[in-house]
Image: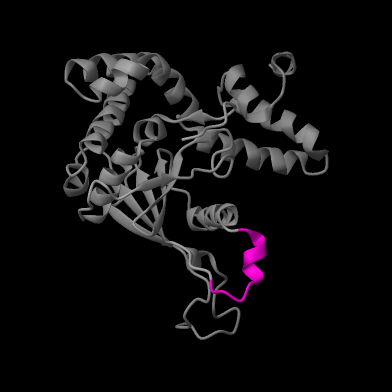
Amino acid sequence: MNVNRNFKDSVFTRLFGNPDLLRELYCALRGISLPPDIPVSINTLENVLYMDLYNDISFEIDGKLIVLIEHQSSINPNMALRLLFYISRVLEKKIKSSTLYSKKKLIIPWPEFYVLYNGIEPYPDENIMKLSDLFENTEDLCLHEKIHPLLELEVKVININEGRNEAIVMRCKKLSDYSKFIGKIYAFLNEMNSLEEAVKKTIIFCRKHDILNEFLEIYASEVLNMISLEWNTEDAIAFAREEGLNEGHEKGRAEEKFVIARNLLAEGMTPEFVQKITGLSVKEIEKLR
């Protein structure tokens, strides 16, 4: 997978950024079997859902275009809309604009959207989020309440926390191990209230109990940085942007960065994290502190 060095993998995308593992994971999610020679083509985009962090994997398999997102924070109610933007970018990248005006009918892959949820808030084993859930009330628009939406996108949300959806998780050992890995971080974090120490203890525990052992043997030194960057990233960004937009609407984009930075610092984010999100210099951030 070709990755821009300015962007960071999450543990999830680094772990599953392999065609064979993606094939196994997709079969587990669908409850099907595919031959090992079915090709998998990865086409993850940059800077679409999570700014400078990869939490998504987009790939094609067996005539289908799959967008797969791992989600640790509260489930975003606008996920279907965000994925509409995402799939538009994917198709725009795949199809030359000139061919849209040809007389030949274009054939595009069948799209499927999955969110794998492993946050701490209670959530059902499975749920379907629809783009039409965001539409204006049909009564307000003088539309028949049972009218079929003329534009729709469905996202299947699957709870992969340890002990949930075991039929799916057990069909893919790496997914099972990943669920245990994240679960252990939560458990240790509750005990010591230090993310760094919780991740370190989790790595030691998992290596000892053969959980993601090969992966951690290679990437153990990077896992702490990955987790620190991605842990609650979306909640922090959403909060900071909401506050920043409210306070800096008339002050321009440059001022907005400072407002966002101040809000992130107030939420306890490190200067390094703030720099990655806003693009401000360390000196500018230190002045804000």
The image shows residue 192 at horizontal and vertical percentages of 33, 16
From the viewer's perspective, tell me whether residue 281 is left or right of residue 164. Answer: right
In the rendering, at what x and y percent does residue 206 appear?
23, 20
Range shown magenta: 96-105
Q: In this view, does 27 lie above or below 266?
A: below
Relative to residue 135, is residue 257 drawn left or right?
right
How many tags in the picture? 0
Q: Which of 190 and 92 is in front in this view?
A: 92
Q: Of 232 and 29, which appears nearest the observer?
A: 29
Please name whichever residue, 146 or 62, is drawn nearer the observer in this view of the structure.
62
Above or below — where is 109 with respect to 242?
below
The residue that appears at 46% across and 38% down in the rendered structure is 55
Q: Which residue is drawn at 44% across and 31% down?
A: 10
Q: Quadrant of residue 185?
A: top left
The image quadrant that residue 17 belongs to is top left
Q: Is residue 113 above or below residue 216?
A: below
Residue at x-position 79% and y-position 33% = 254
Q: In this view, does 260 lie to the left or right of 113?
A: right
Report which quarter residue 224 is drawn in: top left
Colouring chosen for the image of the structure: one colour
Q: Which residue is drawn at 23% across and 49% down?
A: 28
**Would you say residue 192 is visible in this rendering?**
no
Residue 134 image offset from top left, x and y in percent: 53, 64
Observer able to see residue 37 = yes
User: What residue occupies the far right of the structure in this picture?
Assistant: 251
Q: In which quarter of the image is the C terminus?
A: top right
Q: Where is residue 153 in the image (x, y as percent from the top left)?
A: 47, 64
Can residue 23 be found in the magenta stretch?
no
